[in-house]
Amino acid sequence: MSTPNSEQQATIFYHGTKANLKDGDLIAPGFNSNYGKQKKAAYVYLTATLDAAVWGAELALGDGPGRIYTVEATGPMEDDPNLTDKKFPGNPTKSYRTASPIKVTGEVKEWKGHAPEQLQAMKDHLEKLKQQGIEAIED
């Protein structure tokens, strides 16, 4: 893991979820993941792109509405290997993970979700991976 560099420190980061949070709340590893088999999460995920956060909000498990928060890392972070190494070399999604908590600094109240057919295609893809025994998030 690396400490956020000056470019990352100046970047706005987002976290998409269905959890109802407020400014100052910490999102920490150690709780059940919002995805896959909901095993205990070793990392917390954040992104510098609103689109990646929208996916997080739309795909998170739960009954509540999707929410997107602005967040800041409290410790070292690294490229998210679930995306960068496997799907998008070079991290164009600007997705990261950290074993430290992230702090909620605000909520994005207005955001546009993906088209229903695009969202369903992603859910179908994740279900297919699940049937093949492949976890969407590997720690």
Image (cartoon, helix red, strand yellow):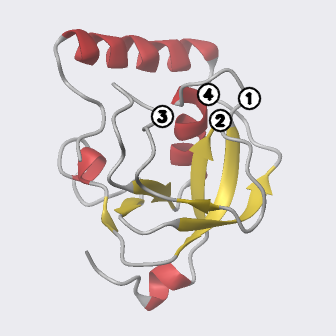
Looking at the image, residue 61 lies above or below residue 112? above
Q: Choose the circle earlier in sequence order: 4 or 2.
A: 2
Amino acid under label 1? Pro
The image shows a total of numbered marks equal to 4
Q: Choose the circle earlier in sequence order: 3 or 4.
A: 3
Label 2 environment density (alpha carbons within 10 Å; few <14, some 14–19, many ≥20): some
Label 3 SS: loop
Q: Residue at x 37, y 60 (%)?
A: 97
How far separated are the C-alphas under marks 3 and 4? 19 Å
Quickly name the residue at label 3: 34
Question: Where on the picture, by quarter, is residue 64?
Answer: top right
Q: Choose the circle earlier in sequence order: 4 or 1.
A: 1
Q: Choose the circle earlier in sequence order: 3 or 1.
A: 3
Q: Nearer the viewer, mark 3 or mark 1?
A: 3
Quickly name the residue at label 1: 65
Label 1 environment density (alpha carbons within 10 Å; few <14, some 14–19, many ≥20): few
How far separated are the C-alphas under marks 2 and 1? 6 Å
